[in-house]
């Protein structure tokens, strides 16, 4: 079994073959079909599907709350055991909203970021709103890629309020590194749902951009009213005022995909957050900007900030 899995993985890693198999097919049709197929509640289909999935991935269900699933979809959107993802409670830290492999990250160059080395794109093209994009000029960004085998739910990176969510229709290109090297402005082409947050204490504007991909039958947002489908009605922005605590669930993907985190200038990537690194929900992602000293009584806060500065 290990030899077969290794041979399949080696075959699939060949760039031309991988790109052909995951992109040179009717992507929307394949995505709709997979969304239907994955929800079939037939024991044989379920078991065969999960078995094939294990051949192509490092699927680990050891921390799943349930280990018996009704369907492939049920396995995809599995919840975890209580405490499986401890949330770092330090108020000076923005934590990862999801389990992921870190992609391109760092400083925003004006209004430009990278999807991969040599492939830049503009923040306004990603967000579809020039005023919104202006908040992150010369700020920081992190690209977080969820593979198919990972935990697919995403969570609030800090105590915050959801101010709005936008829906931008688009394609469903694969978001793996092979496609990112070949398709310019890929994230700006795919369906996505920018979520604008306001940190409760510091007031910073943070944006998470979940990006759909091939076989992702939908981005589900749990902070929206039951039955509300953001995709209905076409491209639009929905104003909201929803409080969330750090670590609260925000939504989930049907399949692996990507979340891009955008922050204003002054934020700093935490140590170890670099391309290719793996990160989990609740682990440190960025440090908040140090608050300027305004009063003698605020000195304890300044000491805390200084402590994080020394760690760099």
Image (cartoon, helix red, strand yellow):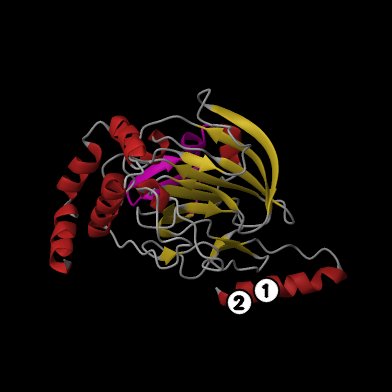
Q: How crowded is mark 1: few (under 14 residues within 10 Å), some or many (20 or more)?
A: few
Q: What element carries label 1?
A: helix
Residue 219 within the magenta-colored segment of the rendering:
no
The answer to whether residue 27 is above or below residue 110 is above
Q: Residue 29 carries which label?
A: none
The residue beneath circle 1 is 306
Q: Can residue 65 be seen in this view?
A: yes
Q: Is residue 184 visible?
A: no
Judging depth in this view, the residue of 148 and 77 nearest the camera is 77
Q: Is mark 2 on a helix, strand or loop?
A: helix
Residue found 51% across the figure and 61% down from its top: 281
In which quadrant of the rendered view does residue 103 lie?
A: bottom left
Q: Quadrant of the N terminus?
A: bottom left
Query: Are the residues flagged by discs 1 and 2 in contact, CB closer than 8 Å?
Result: yes
In which quadrant of the rendered view does residue 230 lie?
A: top right
The residue beneath circle 2 is 310
Judging depth in this view, the residue of 288 and 134 nearest the camera is 288
Distance Cα–Cα, label 1 vs label 2 = 6 Å
Question: Magenta stretch?
Answer: 107-128
């Amino acid at each position: 079994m290990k030899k077969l899995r290794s041979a399949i993985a080696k075959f699939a890693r060949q760039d031309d073959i991988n790109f052909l198999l995951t992109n040179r097919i009717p992507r929307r049709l394949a995505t709709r079909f997979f969304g239907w197929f994955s929800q079939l509640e037939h024991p044989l289909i379920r078991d065969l599907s999960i078995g094939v999935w294990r051949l192509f991935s490092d699927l680990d269900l050891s921390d799943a709350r349930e280990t018996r699933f009704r369907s492939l979809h049920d396995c995809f959107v599995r919840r975890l055991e209580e405490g499986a993802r401890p949330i770092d409670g330090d108020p000076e830290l923005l934590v990862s909203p999801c389990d992921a492999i870190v992609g391109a990250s760092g400083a925003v160059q004006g209004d430009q970021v990278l999807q991969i080395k040599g492939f830049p794109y503009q923040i306004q093209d990603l967000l579809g709103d020039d005023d919104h994009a202006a908040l992150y000029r010369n700020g920081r960004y992190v690209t977080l890629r969820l593979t198919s085998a990972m935990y697919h739910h995403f969570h609030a990176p800090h105590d915050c309020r959801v101010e709005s969510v936008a829906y931008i229709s688009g394609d469903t290109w694969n978001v793996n590194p092979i496609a990112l090297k070949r398709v310019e402005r890929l994230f700006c082409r795919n369906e996505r749902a920018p979520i604008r947050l306001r940190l409760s204490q510091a007031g910073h504007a943070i944006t998470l951009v979940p990006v759909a991909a091939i076989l992702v039958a939908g981005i589900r947002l749990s902070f929206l009213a039951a039955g509300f489908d953001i995709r209905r009605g076409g491209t639009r922005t929905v104003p909201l005022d929803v409080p969330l605590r750090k670590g609260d669930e925000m939504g989930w993907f049907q399949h692996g995909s990507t979340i891009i985190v955008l922050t204003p200038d002054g934020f700093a990537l935490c140590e170890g957050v670099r391309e290719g690194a793996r990160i989990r929900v609740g682990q440190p992602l960025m440090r908040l900007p140090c608050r300027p000293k305004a009063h003698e009584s605020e000195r304890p806060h300044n000491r805390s900030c200084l402590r994080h500065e020394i760690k760099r």
